[in-house]
Image (tube, rainbow, N blue to C red):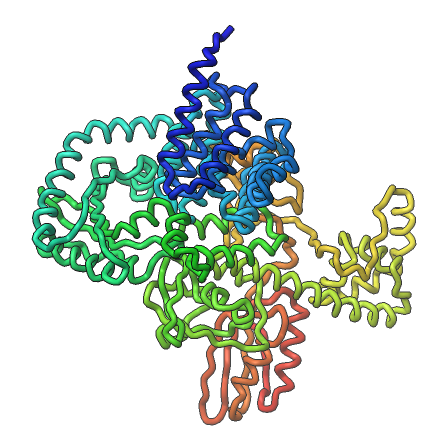
Amino acid sequence: MMVVDSIKENNQIAKEYKELLKISYQSLSKDDRKLIRLAFDTSVDAHKNQRRKSGEPYVFHPISVAKIVASKIGLDATCIAAALLHDVIEDTDYSANKITKIFGKKISKIVVGLTKISKLSKEENVSLQAENFRKMLLTLNDDVRVILIKIADRLHNMQTLDSMPAEKQIKISSETLYIYAPIAHRIGLYDVKSELEDLGLKYTEPEIFNEIKNKIEETKVDQDKYIKNFSRRISEKLKPENLRFKINGRPKSIHSIRNKIINKNISFEEIYDKFAIRIIYNSDRENEKFIAWKIYSIITDHYTPNPLRLRDWITSPRSNGYEALHITVVGPRSKWVEVQIRSERMHEIAEKGFAAHYMYKGGNKSETGLEEWLNRLQEVLENTDTDAIDFVEDFKLNLYSTEIFVFTPAGELKSLAKGSTALDFAFSVHTGLGLKTRGVKVNGKMVPLSHVLISGDQIEIIKSENTKPSSNWLDYVKTSRAKAKIRTALKEEKKLLAEDGKEILRRKLKQLKIKFDEKTVNDLGNFLKLKTSLDLFYRVGIGKVENNELKKFPNNNNRIINFFRKKIGRKPSKFNQAAKEITNNFDLVVFGNEEDKLEYNLAKCCNAIPGDDIFGFVTINDGIKIHKKTCSNAVGLQSKFAYRILKSKWIDSSLLEYSSTIRISGIDNLGIVNEITKLISNTLNINIKKMSFDTVDNIFRGKITLKVRTKNILNDLIKRLKKINGIEKVIRE
């Protein structure tokens, strides 16, 4: 039995409390100290009978979280108090109402938000990481302080993970790398992000972590000596300019080094920038930029810079508020050295992110990069139909991606994620513009919608009211915002097609002297092996239901009805119920953005069936295995073997688009090409892949390659083309 020295523990708790007040980044008033003291006393009382896995009193945990909130993230007294109370509602007899009575609605709301996030990890039969991520983002948009405290909570849990069983260590670490580190990065908490990543790597890949750590320690003496020598030389050059500055060295994180080894396929010894030099100078706001470039000029007068490694985030700050000037120079002994030039204000924003940014704003609520990002986030979150894992994967791209800076035709500067396309840009300006994008000009030249942008591009969007998004657009965009808007638009278009299909079916059944009612629609749906009435209407609307199939229906009607009477059967659905989801006859798995058809097997652990949300996993010996996204193994596979995960989905093979080429000839009337392209563009479910026209002696010939779903749609288009004045022949190759 463990013997507890209560006097010693109480003294240690009191010591921790005093340190908490001492290290606070914000200046604490008398009222602030009273609030923190009340929260501290409440936390001590609530957790008095609880202990952590390590054996220490549980209250040490909320105090440690509060210390991280106060020093590393730099939040105010309200957040420090909320951090002290963050586990009180979840783990003790204190209710939300009681916290509200003692501390008010503001703190209670934050604590309740933190409690909601914690409860998520206890849910079952969902992809925990993905759902956790989505809910956290929802909370972030509601009150960013909740997520900041949660990041601090996770950091302390990672710092004390040694006392947990091995399987818990791996689970918590995987979740940290998957969710918390990307969020910390996006908010601008770079030091916290680096620590989370290193600690995550420590438990998920201990051998690699220890190998890199040992090599860093082996070279530490030489590295420290080099940094000291380089810093001394730089100081000698800067001092005559009467600049107030300090220089320190910063080693690269273990996780960062590991990524470079993997991504560039190089050894530890081949990485030249294992550390960086920071020059932090004192300046007023007016002269910050001038002094930064002055320091740059002095350094590059003595050391040769690499022009490809220049990063000017002072002129164009990152969207999370980060500002600095980064250069890489050839230092002593011909070694590459990264030099980061920042003012004290820039340094604090880099260290504290959100908190420092708002302190320097002095309470001004004008829109910042972070606020703009939160506004975009809200738009994405409003699209609730997106699968959780797809949502996470899309969003993580935006969280971790570096930025590019592009211009509108009016010269306005816009920030986008690296890898963004011309179509992403259109959606970043306005959703309505994105959905009506007909073409794009980059630097005055027409480019495809999928054209990848680079910094400095000037983009002009050409819109058309007749333009409608297609499923191909999802492959043209990178940002989660654009994908969410396209998915919503496609869903609405399907519903409209289903409405048209309903009227077409009504007419066709009338011609066949078949009564159009709910019973008939359900029987016809069963006959065609479709799941819902809306699926039936949609297929009729796009021409997928042939007339000969409808003609067969009356002959089989009685047999089908009798068959289904013997079965428990499905409950008849209202055929005019617009809220129903359109379903498909899923029968084929395709992979990647190109929807490649590959050999695969269904994993036995989850037994995915057609229509399930799935992903492919490349095994070592058994080829591609298909898992449900809610599979119990999904979390582990997604986080530990991300490079072996294949984007996969079930499709209805009958809805695949096929290439077809038509040849057109006739008299070359003025504007005839425009008429042809306009007709095709305004025809639903047809996309132009390639076309060419030439004219000889007033006779024109054209060749157009199209992507169509069915022969009926193509035949209908050919009939309509033949009606254009001047066209004599339209032949399908």
Q: Is residue 418 left or right of residue 277?
A: right
Residue depicted at 39% across the width and 29% down the height: 18
Res 506 → quadrant: bottom right
Q: Is residue 634 above or below residue 105?
A: above
Residue depicted at 88% across the width and 47% down the height: 564
Residue 32 can be seen, yes or no: yes
Residue nearest the viewer, comparing 589 with 316: 316
Q: Position of residue 409 (x, y in %)?
A: 39, 76
Residue nearest the viewer, comparing 48 with 145: 48
Residue depicted at 81% across the width and 63% down the height: 550
Res 631 → quadrant: top right
Residue nearest the viewer, comparing 709 with 633: 633
Q: Quadrant of the C terminus?
A: bottom right
Q: Position of residue 70 (x, y in %)?
A: 41, 38
**Number of disc labels:** 0
Res 123 → quadrant: top right
Residue nearest the viewer, comparing 506 with 217: 217
Residue 271 can be seen, yes or no: no
Q: Position of residue 42 (x, y in %)?
A: 55, 29
Q: Position of residue 16 (x, y in %)?
A: 40, 26
